[in-house]
Amino acid sequence: MSTRDLYTSSVSPTTHEIPLVGDTRFTWEYDDGRDKLLALYQKGKDRQWDSVKRIDWDLEVDPHDVLGVPDQSLAVYGTRHWERMSERERGELRRHSVSWQFSQFVHGEQGAMITAARIVETVPDLDSKFYSATQTMDEARHVEVFSRFLQEKIGMVYPINTKLQDLLNETLTDGRWDMPYLGMQVLIEGLALAAFGVMRDVTTKPLPKQILAYVMQDEARHVAFGRLALRDYYKDLSASEMREREEFVIEGCYLMRDRIRGREIWENFGIDAREVDEMVENSPYMRMFQSLLFSRIVPCVKDIGLWSPRIRETFEEMGVLDASKADLDALMRGDEEIAERLDAERFAAEEADRKAEVDAVIAAEAAVS
Ligand SMILES: [Fe+2]
Ligand SMILES: [Fe+2]
């Protein structure tokens, strides 16, 4: 079935064009790679995986309870709209909500794939070109995984959120080579990584858990790449150039904060936008979720050196400044370990099943003879 038939509202045309800007760069220096970046590239090569083999697509998913989380996670929970809904309508709402979330993931992942490919072209250094080439493949896999999950298991797709679209447009129409890094690797990926993390940790269902844990294992490398490349570059920029980057971050953070309100979902249930904002602001879960979403962006912005009083005030005003204390390296090691542990548990369970089967065959043969 074409994705067109699964969209909650019509998407036309089905392609979106952004004119190419900036220079494509060759380098003739093949031998000056930075050790840390080359090590990350090696890791990128070593950790490639195939979603067809690694993910257990036979696992069943209830489209009306995809994540198996308490309803308190819905901003509408406990309001008069919630009280009015039948059990069937609540199931439908859960489906819309998770479809919206995963739809933004898949559109964002497509943006990441396109941006990673763009970085291969525009970045001046070969080590960064190498690394970004592996990231392009990682992001293709993420698009593949999320779109399959949406189409086969949820059966409903939301169009791209306009704020996310704006941020992608801004990121891709800037000719300076570091801006796609900043918009994509730091802001969009940072927000997505935090959202994946919350869902990975709260879901009680095995299929979304596998998908999120394995995608996060890759994303941990991507954020590390953005940090390494930008930290080096920003050391040498002038004060006015740094200010331009900070403006971009500030504007981007506001766009992302607005995006996570998910107004499109509620409009489908006849709840108007103003009321949604109020609901989101009054929902303890949403408030917690919102601050968690910036938990990866804030320390990264600090780490790459964009840490002027203006940036700090913005984060303070958004109530997320505390996140600057987070240890990004520890978070990333945690993401990798969770994926590895999940593999180990799954493969140990499969091994035990196989052994039980063999034992049963041996016992049956012994009984016959
Ligand atoms: Fe990704
Ligand atoms: Fe990524």
Image (cartoon, helix red, strand yellow):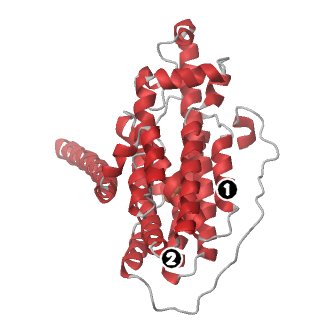
- Crowdedness of circle 1 by 10 Å Cα count: few (<14), some, many (20+)? some
Asked whether the viewer can see residue 68, the reply is: no
CA–CA distance in space, label 2 to label 1: 22 Å
Question: At 78% from the left edge and 48% from the top edge, which residue is drawn?
Answer: 14
Q: Secondary structure at mark 1?
A: helix
Which residue has dot 2 on it?
Answer: 128
- Quarter-of-image position of residue 204: top left
| Mark seen at residue 84 | none
- Quarter-of-image position of residue 43: bottom left
Which of pointers 2 and 1 indicates the residue nearer the eye?
A: 1
Tell me the quadrant of the picture where the N terminus can be found. Answer: top right
Question: Label 1 is placed on what type of residue?
Answer: Glu
Asked whether the viewer can see residue 150, the reply is: yes
Question: At 35% from the left edge and 39% from the top edge, which residue is drawn?
Answer: 201
Q: Is residue 131 above or below residue 284?
A: below
- Quarter-of-image position of residue 11: top right
Q: Secondary structure at mark 2?
A: helix
Question: Label 2 is placed on what type of residue?
Answer: Ser
Mark toward the start of the polypeptide (2 vs 1): 2
Q: Position of residue 207 (x, y in %)?
A: 43, 41
Which residue has dot 1 on it?
Answer: 170
